[in-house]
Amino acid sequence: MAPLLELTDLRTEIKLREGVVHAVDGVSLSVDPGETLAIVGESGCGKTMTALSIMRLLPPGGQIAGGSIKLNGQEISTLSEDELRNIRGNEIGMIFQDPLTSLNPTMTIGNQIAEAVLLHRDVSKEQAMERAVEVLDLVGIPRVRERIKEYPHQFSGGMRQRVMIAMALACEPKLLIADEPTTALDVTIQKQILELIDDLRRRLGMAVILVTHDLGVVAGQADRVAVMYAGKIAEVTDTTTLFSHPRHPYTEALFQALPDKAADAGDRLYSIPGIPPDLVNPPVGCRFAARCRYATDKCREEEPQLIGEVAGHEFRCFYPVGPSERSEKGRIAAYDTSLGEAPPAGPGIGDVLVDLDRLVKDYPVTRGAVLQRRVGWLSAVSDVSFKIRSGETFGLVGESGCGKTTIGKLVVGLEKLTGGVIRFDGKDLAKSSAREYRKERRKIQLMFQDSYASLDPRMRAGALLREPLVIQHIGSRQEQHERVAEMLDKVGLPRTAAERYPHEFSGGQRQRLGFARALMLNPQLIVADEPVSALDVSIQAQVLNMMKELQRQFGLTYMFISHDLGVIRYLSDRIGVMYLGKLVEIGPAEEVYLRPAHPYTRGLLDSAPVADPAQERAKVTEGVRGELPSAIHPPSGCRFRTRCPLAQEICAEVEPPMTPFAGEGHFAACHFPLQAAVGSPVTVASEQAALS
Amino acid sequence: MAIPHTEMSGAVVTEAAPTAPGGGQISAKPRSLLRRGWEVFAESKLALAGSGFVIFIVLFCWVGPHIYVTQQVSTPIENAYCTPGGAHLLGCDNLGYDTLGRLMVAGQNSLTVGLLAAAVACTFGAIYGAASGFIGGLVDSLMMRIVDAVLSIPYTLVIIVLVVIVHPSTLTMIGFIALIYWPQPARLVRGETLSLRTREYVQAVKVAGGGRSRAMFRHIMPNAIGVIIVQATFAVADSILILSLLGFLGFGLPPPTTDWGSMLSQGLNFINLGYWWLIYPAGLLIIMTCVSFNFIGDALRDAVESRLHRR
Amino acid sequence: MTGYLIRRFLQTIVVTILVTVGTFSLLHAIPGGEIRAILGVRATPAMIASTAKQWGFDQPLYVQYSKWLWQLLHGNFGYDISVHAPVTTLMVPAAVRTIVLAVTGTLLGLVVGIPLGIYQAVHRYTAVDNVATGISFIGYGAPTFFVGLLLINWFSVEVHLFPLYNNANPLLSQPTALVLPVITYGFVAFALWSRFMRSSVMDNIIQDYVRTARSKGASERRVIWGHVFRNSLIPVVTLLGLSLPAILSGAVAIEVVFNYPGMGLLFVQSALSTDIQMMLAITVLTTLLTIVGNLLADVAYAVLDPRVRYT
């Protein structure tokens, strides 16, 4: 079967002020009709540029410098703009990462989709609109005829992405290019969108190029995978083989850096040292050599070619992982992945340090022309209670709008409670005097998500780290400087970093700074709000390792807030699952992960992509259907009932209480849980599941 | 306690500067924000040309009279309307003053009023706007309504009224112009303050136990300075224009103090007689000075924005 | 959207009150005031006092203010003592003439500036862009009256192409007299709008939705006119509303230069003769016009931007 799309030695450059970035440097790929090819890699590897190059949608300063792109045998890289326009939106459709900014805010969605049709088909405006209705229905937008006149901002994130897909498919293209289509979406919505794409692919007989950084997504969706690094393809093969027998050291390292894999073994994550190379002056020789644990001089001087030993599996390495003729010669001793001996145990888990008792946080919703009367309340946190013991890591997980970030802010004192009590070390902080509060503040610190926004761009790193000490009047100037230096050492940054400005650091380094700042006041509890969400897998591993190590050294307690189940499971001793302001399940990490009791937890676990194709294919349930309800008018009774496959009448009337389950400290709030609660009769859930 | 680097990165890495243990490299040389801003600024040839002209004109006005010495206090009336050339490079005006020399003296006034009025307006406006944004709530609303009110009145009318009430001197003129200009920087700075208030690095101050004033003075204001400086540059150009308009209408600085606008106004009486030297030089200087400040302001704006948006 | 508009309207009322109070106090601070102006320099204190009593000037300020405001709400702008006629008889025709000038001039500026701005943004850094930028900067930096006078010099005096306004004949009978004032007006307006449109289009053209449009196969032309144009226009509308005071201010200079009997010229004349009633009336009227204009701009903004409409 002739390939639908064939890239041969594609090279794309971007002219910047500092020089020319060789973003795509000799990429060769092919996509067969009807298959899904995933291009995976970390930021800066060139995957997005490759995707954009196909239709020549490059950013200003970008251009294709060489190579060929053939669609159905026809060369398209040399077509004129006019000719290329016939292909865009017609033979090839594309969807982008952020559906909010990718849709014209002042044009109705109906018009935007109709435009796609009118550009390529000779039909009337009414007919184009009909097609728009048809295709919006296909992607699952409810009440299409009404919503077709609405504007993008009136849709939720998931709905907007569906609109984008509809727009891309309006003219039934043969190929759909999806550039990180679900990165900006919640996990449960992500699953819906990915399944939609897959379903449409089969129905319309399309091929799909899926660009992503998430190996879990790859495992679940792709037929074949190409791993990119520093503008080149490191390895390409079919999905099953890649996950079971990766050959390139980078691929191997990526898998070992994934929290998913490590969680089973309880190991430290392998973190790839250093950062990717500069693509303005790319290194001679293998691009991964500087960070590769197997690298030899040959690797640094000569560049390996992308060749394979077995058909369909190619990689770019002189000393690939696993048995191979090449690898026998001159291979250094296999790296022991157990990473040295186990560190001495930390202080261990002690008494209750933080006690959250029936917390409530409501935000006023105002309306009204002049006087801004309050018309309602946004229930961000509703009657949430749990305890965190000293020395443990408590993971708070949930999707957007669940209230986990709000709880973090309440604990840290950035927001005031509407109701409930927070007790720290036995003391109710809200009742303490101003001075005492200030002192107690030192013991609870926060690590922000967005490292760039949390560091004042005008201050040097050293000053930023010193600031907490200055505010709290701790130590003399000299002592403060010493402590800054000490802390920089602890987080793995050179002492000279104190002189630099935030913009001079990479994302991972900034997170280290943020963490160092949180440590300055010697806190007992650190609330980490999505600290690694914005980082690449390899950098993420570095930061997670650092956090784990320092926890052990300083006897810290963590409240780790994230939407990433893999990371949460890896780090946490106990997990709390939140949905729309409520705590729906809580328990030891392994318990919650392997034997969830709440349908939402089950749905969340099913939706979260796991980097194991076998597991992904084994997933039976469809995740969580539907959309998040409004937090201003949350559903009565159980808030999850509108999306729950097991919901009954009682769920709308009575709010389910927290009931205990097998496994110590395992609780869930559900009338029809997935396993028998302690002390309850025969499971009701299994019968229900059989019926539905 | 020394930490073997193994535990940081999972691989044994010797600590040799500049490779950070496990942290990866940091960019080669320390580049402060000021330097980066300067680089962007210097890219604009227009801005460099503008800066060059501003330096030139300042020297022209203040150093010039020492080089090209002329009589600006009392002159023989028979010199009136002399044509350019000889001892008087740009001719003389209706009272016999040497035009070129007078341009220098007038320039001193125009520039002084322009620069100081801009400085006063922007300083006061910045403090007002920052306070309003910082305090928030009803006070903020009221303060902004006052700003709206002042902005609604066409400024020419106000300043004419002011000039009629109080016959101006250089000092009062600066005050008047500042009085009509201050709402603009006030509104701008308030907007900046509001947006910066929600930034996470301001929240971080609270988490560390710091108070609102610390957040305000150590974090918000320094980050708003860039915007203020850009505004101030444009304010200089606008002030010079306002002053020249007043001079033209006859409400300007009282004689013998003169400014370019007044010179222009007088000269325009003789447009029919073709005494171009009484008209074009003054007009040209006004235009070029204002244009220069606009170039500088534009480039500064790019520099400030690039600093904030980089990466 | 209705909520948004109601709120703006109420804010407007607050602003208007502040403005009237402010202007009223300001104008009554003029030493001597109207009475002295009318009665002349040799008026004795007794004469002043009796005239004051006669016309009600001796009452406390707030009483005068409330009386005046009351009259105002009935459409009575006051009685002009010096010309012995209600203020409105002089002011309204002048206002009409000013509005004609301002609207035509601004329209000219928009009609030329907006397409040019778009062209510049699409063909940025080409020769045309640079030349247009240069001309815009001169438009910023050149005093309006200077430009006006140059135009008069070149086209009316030397070439006799466009006649100057003749006060004796009504406006409509001499349309060509409007040409030069409108062009002067338009020149400054065009500078502002073309610059602004250029930067607005440049901001929009790098947005993600433009890339999406291209990915659908839209031509550059369709991208610009079907997508970018409307989104770029939105900030222009807002700016239009905000620059109304400046527009009306600018009219003053032009009217004086061209001897065009609009409100600006009237104001200057009133200032020179200390005719307080007239000055007050004109200030209030122009402010009201500004405020109404702002409100209209807000409505237009809501119409253009659906994000405001549906939240």
Image (tube, rainbow, N blue to C red):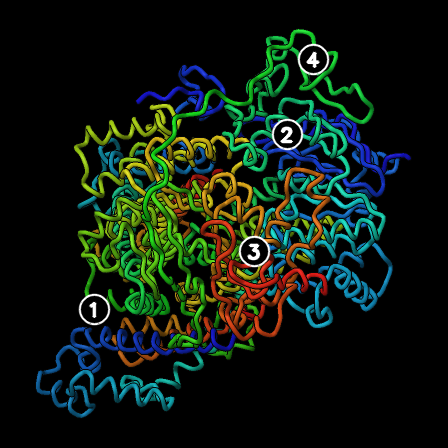
Within 10 angstroms of label 3, few (less than 14), some, or many (20 or more) residues? many
- Percent across and percent down for residue B39 are 43, 31
Among numbered discs 4 and 2, the one appearing first in the sequence: 2
Under mark 1, the amino acid is: Ile
Which mark identifies residue A327? 4
The one nearer the camera, A436 or A342, is A342
Query: Which chain is mark 2 on?
Result: A
Callout 2 and callout 3 share a chain: yes
- Nearest-to-viewer mark from 2 and 3: 3
- Residues beneath discs 4 and 2 located on the same chain: yes
* Mark linked to residue A597: 3
Q: Quadrant of residue A220?
A: top right
Per the model, the C-alpha gap separating discs 3 and 1 is 81 Å
Front label number (4 vs 2)? 4
Q: Residue at x 30, y 69 (%)?
A: B138
The tag on residue A23 is 2
Residue C79 appears at what percent x and percent y? 30, 88
